[in-house]
Amino acid sequence: MLDNRTQKYADTLAQLIRMDTTSYDNQTDKTAFYHFHKLLKEKFPNIFSVVEYEDFSGSFLLKWKGESSQAPILLMNHHDVVAATGNWRFPPFSAEIADGKIWGRGTLDDKGGLWAMLQAADELASEGFVPKRDIYFVSTCTEEQTGLGADIISAALKEKGLRFDMVLDEGGMIVFEPIAGAIGKYAMVGVGEKGCVNLKFTARSEGGHASTPENNTPLVRLGKFMAEVDNGKQFKSELSPTVCTTFNRISKGMKGPVKFLLENAKMFKHLLSAVIPKISAAAGAMLKTTIAFTMCSGSTESNVLPESAWVLADMRYSHHQGSKDSIRVVTEIAKKYDIETEIVGPVFDSPLSDTESYAFKTVENAIARIFPDVITAPYIMTGASDSRYFSRVCDNCIRFSPFTINNEQLDSVHAVNENLDLDCLAPAVDFYRLIITEA
Ligand SMILES: [Zn+2]
């Protein structure tokens, strides 16, 4: 039996989940997103009656006028979801409630966060609350694709000359045992993300018939090149101050010699930077640039040698090595195999937020008050989020969603059976209420 508050929250969130807002590559029809805006206005009438609403091709910006002219803050999430394929326990847009959870595409990524943010604002608006400073809310419909909505909204805010004291986007959540042996619940608060660039490597030849091949044809050279790059040795592994803080916080739930090492990560940074990538690929990815080969092409006929063949790589570069040097290093290896390197698309840089900043401290304090048994640890996200665009208007973009999830739920993001515990709903609203009232 659910209490009244949770029941009411679950009903509202279920309605958001039931509206299919899947985004696609090159999507021009935004009808579903506008229906979704209409639904939000119906469900959260109090906040929508006091904010200025601005549409950006299916993404939106809300401005809640505050009492003072202090620098504003911005809270954001997104309302598009990835396609729901595969075999689901319940239909992905049914928002079924079972086993104390709500099931469906978008429960975690990211309609749960969007719902909690607007629910908190709506309650406060209905109570006659007026924020101390301007509060902006953003929700985009392109997060799962190009991020264009975040791009144009942040550009519009910059154009107005605005600077924000805090941007809070979706990101890390409250998890159990983030690394083996760290017992307890940890709020993983994203303070930045690795930069991202796509690189195309092309090998050329005279072509010819496959019956009389020469050595080192384009595909062979690409293969040798990929094998060399794959071990990752070309990139510098380093424990940045942020990663030292991550380990230091995580060590709080540990015992024994590993606790000692992580507690004193700064002192043991050379040892740790060598050992960690060998233990965990995920933890290792926080320490250095990574490269993953994702697409390729060769000849169009099975018996014809390609005149040119290419492979495409997704490179995520570390803050300490940066885009320029990471690209230079692989370009030099490519040259050894007579392969050309080309940058495809934009090069993204995302600065790290300061863990001593107002933004981080505010989120940390809200976590301590709403989730008193949780340890807060900053971390660097290896995936990309909409908030990367907002470093244009804010020095401290924080990535955190106030939900407690287990490993199974973490794996359900972008996969089958995405779900969220109903127990998480009320604390998430309380978290956003605190962020808004304390701003
Ligand atoms: Zn998301």
Image (cartoon, helix red, strand yellow):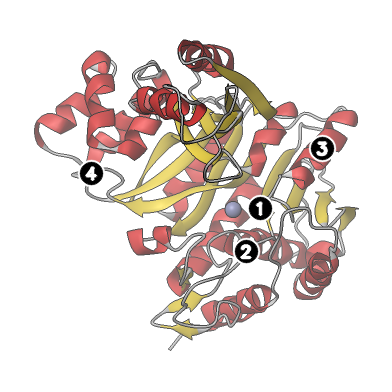
Labelled pair 2, 1 in contact (Cβ < 8 Å): yes
Q: Secondary structure at mark 2?
A: helix
Q: Secondary structure at mark 4?
A: loop
Write down the residue under mark 4: 182
Write down the residue under mark 3: 68
Residue 111, numbered label = 2
Q: Mark 2 vs ligand 1: CB under 8 Å? A: no
Sequence-first tag of 2 and 3? 3
| Relative vertical location of residue 432 with respect to residue 10 in this rendering, above or below | above
Sequence-first tag of 3 and 1? 3
Q: Mark 1 vs ligand 1: CB under 8 Å? A: yes
In the picture, the quarter occupied by the C terminus is top right
Give x and y (percent) for residue 335: 51, 12
Give x and y (percent) for residue 423: 44, 71
Q: Nearer the viewer, residue 82 or 283?
A: 82
Residue type pointed to by label 2: Lys
**Residue 439 visible in the current orientation:** no
Write down the residue under mark 1: 77
Labelled pair 4, 1 in contact (Cβ < 8 Å): no
